[in-house]
Image (cartoon, rainbow, N blue to C red):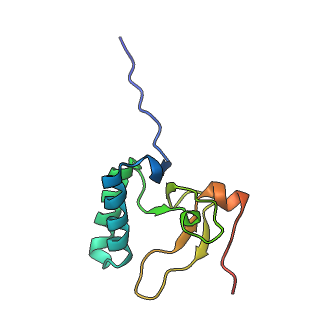
Amino acid sequence: MAVMTHAPARLEANYRTLSTDDQDRFDQLMERADHAGPHDYQPLMDALAVLTGLFTARDIARCSCWTDTGGCGCAAIFDTALPGVVVTATNDPDCNLSQLQCPTCGHDHPRPITD
């Protein structure tokens, strides 16, 4: 009798490994989530979780190092609940998404908010 085991849940994905169409879809979903109302936000995050294979994530982000001036270009997509995530900029008014660094970048070269 064979024993089936479940693969551990993925905690990160890589934006660069997504197809061009999936990158476009990811960007569109993130833009919509940033401006979504309370009833639309979670379904958009759920769609992002399916798109990226991060099925257990409730909140998805792409590392802010991807677009930060002087950033390392990290392409990590991750669950925002992971320990070690660093907030680099809070969300703008009327927006839902803050700028976050993945745990690796947050550990290696954090750029936390300065007031």
Residue 41 at what x, y percent from top left?
Answer: 33, 71
Q: Is residue 45 visible?
A: yes
Answer with left or right where residue 6 lies relative to residue 73: left
Identify the residue at horizontal 45%, vertical 53% (top origin). 15
Residue 70 at what x, y percent from top left?
Answer: 66, 68
Identify the residue at horizontal 39%, vertical 19% (top origin). 3
Identify the residue at horizontal 44%, vertical 33% (top origin). 7
Quadrant of the rendered image containing residue 59: bottom left
Q: Is residue 14 visible?
A: no
Residue 61 at what x, y percent from top left?
Answer: 47, 63
- Is residue 58 placed above or below 68 in the rendered structure? above
- Is residue 19 placed above or below 83 in the rendered structure? above
Answer with left or right where residue 63 lies relative to residue 33: right
Q: Nearer the viewer, residue 58 or 95?
A: 95
Residue 47 at what x, y percent from top left?
Answer: 30, 58
The C terminus lies in quadrant: bottom right
Q: Nearer the viewer, residue 3 or 28?
A: 28
